[in-house]
Image: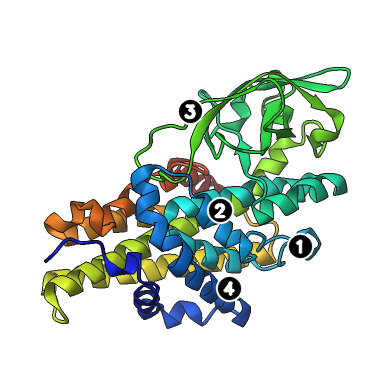
C-alpha cells in the first residue's frame, strides 16, 4: 500500500461519501429535521473548508483561524444563542451534532470553535443587556476571540481553591494572579476570568469578570508545545493589578460558582461531542486505509474490530444526543448526568483512536494517514472541562446519595 495522504483530506466529495456511509439510522431517527439540516450544512462546510487544512494546521502548529472563520461566516457560531444577539436559537442537540462534525474534520478547529461559545455563554447567563450586546455578537461571528479563564497552577478541577484575587478599588476591582492551560489565551480579546474576592469563603467567594485582553497589566505566556490540538493555542495568563471597572462584573459579586456550574453543561456537551467526532474520524480513516489495502474483502480480524468500534460509536452518539436533549428540556440536569456523558464519550474518543492505530498495524503510526493525529488530539478531551476522574467522582456521589435513600 502506498502512503500518500488519504484522498478524504483534500477531496470533499470523497470525504462526504465516506461519512455519509457511516451515518447510523438508529441515531438519526431521534434528530429533528432542523438538527439533520445543521449536520448537513456543517458536514459540507467541514469537507470543503476545514478537513483540507487539518493536516497542515497540525504539522505547522498554525492557529486554525481560517477554518473557524469559515464556520462563523456560515452562521454556525451562535447555535445556542438567541437571534437578537446574532444566534440561531437552536438546540443543544443541534450544537452537539455540529461539534461532532467539526471534530471529525479537525479537532483543533473544534476546540477553538467551542471556546468561542464557552466564553460567550456565561455572558448570556449572567451578563447585563449592555454586556451581552457588546461582546456576544463578536464572539459568535468571529470578530472577537474569547477565553474562559478558570484553571490555575494549583487549582484545576477544584475551582474553590482559586487564588487569583479581585480586590475592591475606587473604580471597581484590582485583579492579580496567574491562570494556566487557557485555550486561546494567547490571543483572546475577551477573557471571562473567575477570581476570588475572599479566599476564606472558598467557592462562595468566587466572582466572574469580563476582562478585555488589551488592558494594561495582562501578560500572556507563549503557547505550550502540546501533544495534540496543535491548531489551538493554550497559554498562561498573568494579571498584575489589572484595573477592572464596575461595569465588567459578570452577575453579582460572589456569583461566580453558580455561573461555573451552569456553564459546564454546555462545555461538557462540547467535549463529549469531540470524543464522538474523534472516534468517528479514527474509524473512518481506518476504513479508508483498509479499503485501499485489502479492497472490498477485509480479513476477519479487522472486520470484527471495526464492528466493535461501530457499535461503541453508535452507543456514545446515542448517549450524547440523549443527554443534550435532556439539557434542552430540563435546566436542573445534574452534574452526574452530564458527567456520565462527558466521561463515556471522551474515553471512547481516545480508546477508539488507540484501537484504530492497532488495527492498521505499522500504518497506524504514520502521520500522513491521520489516524495517529486522532489519538493525540483525543487525549486532552479526557482532561479538560473537568477530568474524567472528576466526572466519575460526580457520578459516584449521586450513586451514593441514591444508595442512602434506599437504605
For the residues bearing labels 3 and 4, Cβ distance under 8 angstroms = no
Q: How is the image coloured?
A: rainbow
Q: Quadrant of residue 364?
A: bottom left
Mark toward the start of the polypeptide (2 vs 4): 4
| Front of the two marks 1 and 2 | 2
Q: Position of residue 121 (x, y in %)?
A: 69, 50
Mark toward the start of the polypeptide (1 vs 4): 4
Mark toward the start of the polypeptide (3 vs 4): 4
Q: Which residue shows up at 56% across the image and 61% down it? A: 70
Residue identifier under label 3: 222
Q: Is residue 339 left or right of residue 243?
A: left
Distance from disc 2 to disc 3, alpha carbons, whole Å, reads 21 Å
**Residue 38: mark in rendering:** 4
398 and 262: which is toward the camera: 262
Callout 2 crowding tier (Cα within 10 Å): few <14, some 14–19, many ≥20: many
Residue identifier under label 2: 113
Distance from disc 1 to disc 2, alpha carbons, whole Å, reads 18 Å
Q: Is residue 105 left or right of residue 327?
A: left
Considering only vertical position in the picture, is 79 above or below 133?
Answer: below
Considering only vertical position in the picture, is 391 above or below 352?
Answer: above
Mark toward the start of the polypeptide (1 vs 3): 1
49 and 195: which is toward the camera: 49
Amino acid at each position: 500500500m502506498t502512503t500518500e495522504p488519504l484522498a478524504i483530506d483534500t477531496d470533499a466529495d470523497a470525504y462526504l461519501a465516506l461519512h455519509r456511509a457511516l451515518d447510523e439510522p438508529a441515531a438519526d431517527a431521534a434528530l429533528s429535521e432542523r438538527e439533520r439540516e445543521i449536520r448537513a450544512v456543517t458536514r459540507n462546510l467541514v469537507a470543503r473548508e476545514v478537513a483540507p487544512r487539518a493536516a497542515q494546521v497540525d504539522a505547522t502548529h498554525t492557529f486554525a483561524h481560517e477554518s473557524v472563520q469559515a464556520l462563523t461566516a456560515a452562521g454556525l457560531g451562535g447555535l445556542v444563542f438567541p437571534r437578537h444577539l446574532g444566534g440561531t436559537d437552536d438546540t443543544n442537540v443541534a450544537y452537539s451534532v455540529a461539534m461532532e462534525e467539526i471534530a471529525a474534520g479537525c479537532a483543533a478547529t473544534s476546540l477553538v470553535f467551542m471556546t468561542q461559545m464557552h466564553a460567550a455563554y456565561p455572558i448570556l447567563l449572567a451578563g447585563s443587556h449592555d454586556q451581552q450586546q457588546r461582546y456576544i455578537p463578536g464572539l459568535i461571528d468571529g470578530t472577537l476571540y474569547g477565553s474562559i479563564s478558570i484553571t490555575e497552577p494549583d487549582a484545576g478541577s477544584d475551582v474553590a481553591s482559586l487564588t487569583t484575587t479581585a480586590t475592591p478599588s475606587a473604580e471597581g476591582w484590582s485583579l492579580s494572579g496567574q491562570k494556566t492551560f487557557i485555550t486561546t489565551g494567547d490571543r483572546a480579546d475577551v477573557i471571562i476570568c473567575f477570581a476570588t474576592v475572599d479566599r476564606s469563603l472558598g467557592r462562595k467567594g468566587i466572582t466572574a469578570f469580563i476582562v478585555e485582553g488589551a488592558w494594561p497589566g495582562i501578560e500572556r505566556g507563549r503557547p505550550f508545545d502540546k501533544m495534540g490540538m496543535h491548531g489551538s493555542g493554550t497559554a498562561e495568563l498573568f494579571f498584575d493589578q489589572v484595573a477592572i471597572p464596575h461595569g465588567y462584573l459578570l452577575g453579582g459579586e460572589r456569583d461566580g460558582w453558580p455561573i461555573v456550574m451552569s456553564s459546564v453543561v454546555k462545555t461538557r456537551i462540547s467535549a463529549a461531542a469531540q470524543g464522538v467526532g474523534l472516534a468517528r474520524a479514527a474509524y473512518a480513516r481506518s476504513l479508508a486505509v483498509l479499503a485501499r489495502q485489502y479492497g472490498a474483502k477485509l480479513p476477519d480480524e479487522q472486520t470484527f474490530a471495526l464492528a466493535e468500534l461501530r457499535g461503541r460509536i453508535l452507543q456514545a452518539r446515542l448517549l450524547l444526543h440523549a443527554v443534550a436533549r435532556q439539557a434542552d428540556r430540563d435546566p436542573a440536569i445534574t452534574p452526574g448526568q452530564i458527567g456520565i456523558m462527558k466521561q463515556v464519550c471522551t474515553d471512547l474518543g481516545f480508546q477508539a483512536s488507540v484501537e484504530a492505530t492497532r488495527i492498521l498495524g505499522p500504518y497506524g503510526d504514520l502521520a500522513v494517514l491521520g489516524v495517529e493525529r486522532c489519538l493525540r488530539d483525543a487525549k486532552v478531551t479526557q482532561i479538560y472541562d473537568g477530568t474524567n476522574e472528576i466526572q466519575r467522582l460526580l457520578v459516584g456521589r449521586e450513586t451514593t446519595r441514591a444508595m442512602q435513600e434506599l437504605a
